[in-house]
Image (spheres, rainbow, N blue to C red):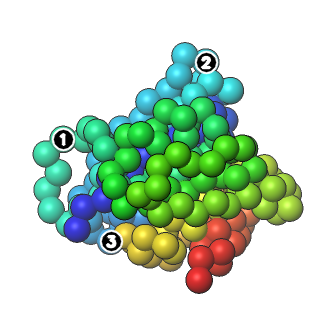
Amino acid sequence: MREEIVIAGFGGQGIMFAGTLLAQGAMEEDLQVTFFPSYGAEMRGGTANCNLIISDEEIGSPVVINSSAALMLNQPSLDKFEKRMKGKGLLIINSSLVDREVERKDLEIIKIPATEMAERLGNVKVANMIALGAYLKKSRIISLESVIKSLPKVLGERKRDLLEVNQKALREGGGLIK
């Protein structure tokens, strides 16, 4: 098993947090993981993306050329990474911020109004967790429970107050997938 994932969006959308959490969850399941962050020049409001590889075998390079899965939280990210996906890949789109149709016809596409759902939960910043929850449920690469178990470790003590809303967002995102 090997999954190459890109998570991308604006700075401030928790792209790196989602990637770190996914990596930690995979390590909880004793899988091999690489995590490669990339920030735009501006940090908050600029572009941000991270590449992850999750595998049950040793990983030789952290570089993702063509991803097998992508979580695109905004329009510029979809514009940049859609063409770089492998055929039959899984594409999760935040339909709250992406207003165009996907051009490729060889991808499995799941559209989620992640930002709107996060607003209903009272914290727009958990749109990343809604998208991640849907990805985890659909891909079954690792369990949603492993990621939820990793939340306290990744959040740390100073953000412990965000534990409950992040857990809820992960479960709501997972609940979208039947």
Question: Where in the figure is residue 120, as x and y percent of width and height?
Answer: 86, 61
Question: Where in the figure is residue 104, as x and y percent of width and height?
Answer: 47, 49
Q: Residues within 10 Å of mark 3 (few under 14, many from 20)?
A: few
* Residue 61: assigned label: 1
Q: Residue at x 64, y 60 (%)?
A: 111
| Nearer to the camera, 138 or 133 | 138
* Residue 29: assigned label: 3
Q: In the rendered image, which residue does mark 2 sit on?
A: 42
Asked if marks 1 and 2 touch (Cβ < 8 Å), the reply is no
Q: Quadrant of residue 15?
A: top right
Q: Amino acid at mark 2?
A: Glu
**Farthest bottom residue?**
178
Dot placed on the residue nearer the N-terminal end, 1 or 2: 2
**Above or below — where is 94 with respect to 146?**
above
What is the distance, in whole Å, between disc 1 and disc 3 at their CAs?
20 Å
What is the distance, in whole Å, between disc 1 and disc 2 at their CAs?
27 Å
| Nearer to the camera, 16 or 138 | 138
Which quarter shows the N terminus? bottom left
Q: Is 153 displayed left or right of 55 in the figure? A: right
Asked if marks 3 and 2 touch (Cβ < 8 Å), the reply is no
Question: Where in the figure is residue 109, as x and y percent of width and height?
Answer: 53, 61
Q: Amino acid at mark 3?
A: Glu
Q: Secondary structure at mark 2?
A: loop
**Above or below — where is 114 with respect to 39?**
below
Question: Where in the figure is residue 121, as x and y percent of width and height?
Answer: 82, 63
What is the distance, in whole Å, between disc 3 and disc 2 at their CAs?
35 Å
